[in-house]
């Protein structure tokens, strides 16, 4: 049972390993493996936070998903075991494919309040396998962010966040370790400033790398096994030649893992300057007529709608992270519990619509469900 839950947490799929060799360039050996690489300390930390209630709930959720696929109608057992909480919509960078960076939101912007977070956790914490402190924006901009991480950690919930790394000064790095955060993803999309800033507009690579060094230092000084530190490298045309370099850089600093991620592009049909030249690193493929299409086939099912949801800073519930502006609002946890929303009419209608035809739902048309997103790497 525990192994099954761990498999679902760490994922199944294709892992790309980078061969070593001076001057050999990138030569990925891609193969199917039953489970992505597990990092022992991180895996043990996750398993220690499992409880009978969490395992039973996860089993119910997994069973209901497969029952749904078999019956072709929504079957919902259990409660979501993954929740993404949005700490803020604000961001210090201007990344070209990010609504937060482009300041293009139509919904209100603001910061998650700690008292609201605490009340919501009272309702959901006992069934959560992990909590993601991220949707849009830069989490560290919220002054209460690390206090909320500690609140979740005190409840025995595995916590994850993703940051652009510009706020990891020495004091924040120490507070991050002390908060009990379990996993920290740092965006490092280039190994030189010239390349890095082509996507991370207004970003300073050296600030990010120094922040990573601060974290490694405080992990060692506080003798803490957490957080599991990840360099995430979003593969785009300007940086695809630096994939080997970021693996070496992570190793030099003491980062635990490197993950290469394909980029979601909003305008891709006629090509895009950010699209990698090597198609294996893109979510899109070139058609015979010269236009581009998304690699996955938009099958009429979606795992996310059965195990996870997104809660915005002001309490709105979105079906997944592709609904940046929450155009498909499924409820408001300020007005009713997430458990009621999860089993409510809006969720049932959305799941039914999805089973009938994902291609008819706007946020699903550029979705990666069934598409390889994480390319993997070893440090």
Image (cartoon, rainbow, N blue to C red):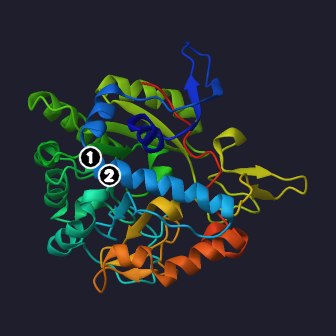
**Near-viewer residue (60 or 10):** 60
Location of residue 303 in the rendering, given as x and y in whole percent from the top left corner: 55, 57
**Near-viewer residue (63 or 9):** 63
* Placement of the N terminus among the 4 image quadrants: top left
**Near-viewer residue (316 or 128):** 128
* Placement of the C terminus among the 4 image quadrants: top left
- The residue shown at (38%, 37%) is 2
Q: Secondary structure at mark 1?
A: loop
Q: Residue furthest right?
A: 288
- Asked if the residue at tag 1 contacts the one at tag 2, i.e. Cβ–Cβ closer than 8 Å, the answer is yes
* In the displayed structure image, the side of residue 286 where residue 281 appears, left or right: left
To which residue does mark 2 refer?
Answer: 54
Q: What's the distance in space between the residues labelled 2 and 1, CA to CA?
A: 5 Å
Q: Residues within 10 Å of mark 1 (few under 14, many from 20)?
A: some
Q: Which mark is residue 51?
A: 1
- The residue shown at (32%, 70%) is 90
């Amino acid at each position: 049972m525990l192994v099954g839950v761990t498999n679902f947490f760490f994922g199944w799929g294709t892992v790309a390993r980078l061969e070593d060799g001076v001057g050999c360039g990138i030569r990925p050996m891609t193969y199917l493996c039953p489970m992505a690489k597990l990092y022992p300390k991180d895996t043990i930390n996750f398993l220690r936070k499992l409880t009978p209630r969490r395992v039973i709930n996860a089993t119910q959720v997994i069973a209901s998903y497969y029952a749904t696929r078999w019956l072709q109608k929504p079957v919902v057992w259990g409660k979501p075991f993954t929740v993404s909480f949005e700490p803020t919509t604000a961001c210090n960078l201007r990344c070209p494919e990010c609504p937060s960076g482009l300041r293009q939101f139509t919904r209100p912007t603001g910061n998650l309040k700690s008292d609201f977070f605490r009340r919501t956790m009272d309702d959901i914490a006992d069934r959560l396998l992990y909590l993601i402190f991220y949707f849009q924006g830069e989490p560290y901009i919220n002054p209460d962010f690390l206090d909320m991480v500690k609140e979740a950690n005190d409840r025995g919930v595995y916590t994850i966040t993703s940051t652009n790394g510009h706020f990891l000064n020495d004091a924040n790095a120490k507070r991050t370790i002390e908060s009990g955060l379990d996993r920290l993803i740092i965006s490092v999309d280039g190994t030189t400033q010239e390349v890095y800033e082509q996507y991370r507009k207004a970003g300073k690579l050296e600030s990010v790398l120094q922040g990573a060094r601060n974290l490694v230092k405080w992990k060692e000084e506080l003798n803490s096994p957490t957080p599991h530190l990840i360099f995430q490298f979003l593969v785009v045309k300007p940086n695809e030649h630096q994939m080997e370099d970021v693996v070496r850089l992570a190793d030099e600093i003491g980062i635990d893992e490197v993950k290469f991620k394909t980029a979601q592009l909003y305008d891709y049909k006629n090509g895009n300057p950010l699209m990698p030249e090597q198609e294996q690193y893109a979510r899109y493929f070139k058609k015979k007529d010269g236009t581009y299409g998304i690699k996955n086939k938009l099958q009429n099912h979606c795992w996310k709608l059965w195990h996870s949801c997104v809660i915005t800073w002001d309490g709105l519930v979105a079906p997944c992270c592709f609904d940046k502006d929450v155009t498909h609002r499924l409820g408001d946890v300020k007005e009713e519990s997430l458990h009621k929303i999860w089993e409510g009419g809006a969720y049932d209608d959305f799941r039914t619509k999805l089973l009938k035809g994902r291609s008819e739902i706007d946020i699903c048309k550029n979705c990666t469900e069934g598409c390889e997103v994480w390319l993997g790497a070893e440090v």
